[in-house]
Amino acid sequence: MMTDNNPTFRPTGASSPAANLVWLFILALAGLGGSVVIACIAPFVALAVALAGTVRLTVALRAMTAIWLGNQFVGFAFYHYPRTPNTVFWGLAIGAAALLTTAVAAKILKHGTALPILARAALALGLGFIVYGSSLFAAALFLGGIETFSPAIIAQVGFSNLVWFIGLVALNELVAIICKPWLGTIPRMVRAA
């Protein structure tokens, strides 16, 4: 369980391995669902903050890698991404940006302990979005696609990640309540009031 007394954002001993696994599975399904529902634009920033806020960084990075691989599978299998070097490079750029965003979110959540948890999460989401978008913009300078960085598209992706993050926080609280009797404490993104 994450609390303001736990600045490293590692689940405490009360969080069982089974509970951690269930939470990671739920986040992976959310990433896969996001890939399918919103035309393969997974909410990587929201997922990065959710992961960084509930599990150790190494676990979060492994889970983000799995989510990214799932996203790529959906793109190639269901959205028929072209099998070209440029598409592969874009996929790698998205994966690298998602991992970098996860690391940045973890750093903010760990070192911003003077702020309340919700403020840290909001800061991690905002700065994570800037890091993610900037990373992809840098990739677009080499791979093409700068036209997709219009203010309208950036706002749409940002709003989507905000909505997804709010949904993930709500889902985390719901899962914590439902699963506690049979799994123990689920890693929590926000401290119970």
Image (cartoon, rainbow, N blue to C red):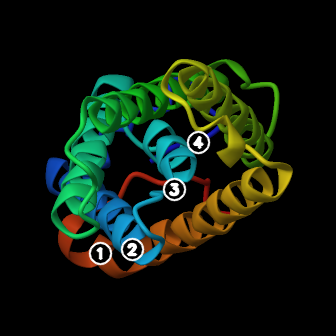
Sequence-wise first label, 3 or 4: 4
Rendered residue at 43%/43% (across/down): 51
Q: What amino acid is found at the position of numbered circle 4 in the picture? A: Thr
Q: What amino acid is found at the position of numbered circle 1 in the picture? A: Cys
* Marks 1 & 4, CB-CB < 8 Å contact: no
Location of mark 3 (residue): 43
Spatial CA distance of label 3 from label 1 is: 25 Å
Q: Residue 166, located in which quarter of the rendered image? A: bottom right
Q: What amino acid is found at the position of numbered circle 2 in the picture? A: Val
Q: What amino acid is found at the position of numbered circle 3 in the picture? A: Pro
Spatial CA distance of label 2 from label 4 is: 17 Å
Position in image of residue 1 (x %, y %): 44, 48
Instruction: Report crowding for label 1: few under 14, some 14 to 19, many 20 or more residues within 10 A (C-alpha).
Output: some
Q: Is residue 31 left or right of residue 78?
A: right
Rendered residue at 66%/47% (across/down): 148
Rendered position, 36 above or below 120:
below
Rendered position, 49 above or below 104:
below
Spatial CA distance of label 1 from label 2 is: 6 Å
Q: Residue 191, located in which quarter of the rendered image? A: bottom right
Location of mark 1 (residue): 179
* Marks 3 & 4, CB-CB < 8 Å contact: no
Q: Secondary structure at mark 2?
A: helix
Rendered position, 136 above or below 166:
above
* Marks 1 & 2, CB-CB < 8 Å contact: yes
Position in image of residue 86 (x %, y %): 34, 31
Position in image of residue 159 (x %, y %): 74, 62
Location of mark 4 (residue): 3
Spatial CA distance of label 2 from label 3 is: 20 Å
Q: Secondary structure at mark 1?
A: helix
Location of mark 2 (residue): 175
Q: Nearer the viewer, mark 3 or mark 4?
A: 3
